[in-house]
Amino acid sequence: MLANYINIMNRLTGMGDEMGTFINSYIKNFQESLYAGVTDDNEVYHFILHEIEKCDNVEVKQAIVDKIKQADNYREVKKIADLLKNILQYT
């Protein structure tokens, strides 16, 4: 019976290690994406306002759509990263 208990604890420890590795990797990827892309909402909004003024061009419209998608992705990734950081602080 003790051997079964030890096996279960070993598997739980392994899963905990895998989860920690995943979280660290996710945060690292998030930080790398911050340096490579949009860093805040103000940049996106200023870009959109500036480009809308010249919006009689299909390519410009596509650039606006792309920036909006970048902002949405950034917000989602930031929310998750902030949540993971909070969880890590309490463990």
Image (spheres, helix red, strand yellow):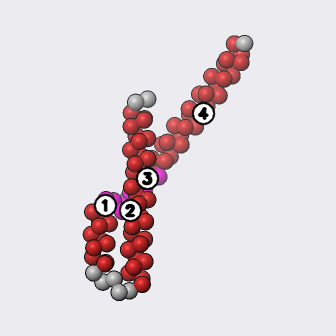
Secondary structure found at label 3: helix
Query: Is 45 placed above or below 9 here?
Result: below
In primary-sequence order, the first of circles 3 and 1 is: 1
Do the residues bearing badges 1 and 2 touch, measured as CB atoms within 8 Å?
yes
Q: Find the magenta span and give its range.
A: 29-40
Dot 2 or dot 4: first in sequence order is 4
**On the image, numbered disc 4 is attached to which residue?**
15
Q: Which mark is residue 41?
A: 1
Q: Secondary structure at mark 4?
A: helix
Residue 1 in the magenta stretch? The answer is no
Q: What is the quadrant of the C terminus in the image?
A: top left
Q: Position of residue 12 (x, y in %)?
A: 61, 27
Crowding near the residue tagged with mark 4, few <14, some 14–19, many ≥20 C-alpha atoms within 10 Å:
few
Does residue 39 belong to the magenta stretch? yes
Secondary structure found at label 2: helix
Q: Residue at x 42, y 46 (%)?
A: 81
**Residue 19: which quarter of the image?**
top right
Cα separation, mark 1 vs mark 4, equals: 36 Å
Q: Which residue type carries mark 3? A: Val
Does the image show residue 36? Answer: no
**According to the image, label 2 marks what residue?**
71
Three-letter code, disc 2: Ala
Measure the alpha-carbon separation of dots 2 and 4.
Answer: 33 Å
Q: Which mark is residue 77?
A: 3
Q: Is residue 23 above or below residue 53?
A: above
Furthest residue in direction top, as rendered: 1
**Disc on the earlier residue, 3 or 2:** 2
Identify the element where label 1 is drawn.
helix
Q: CA distance from mark 3 to mark 4?
A: 23 Å
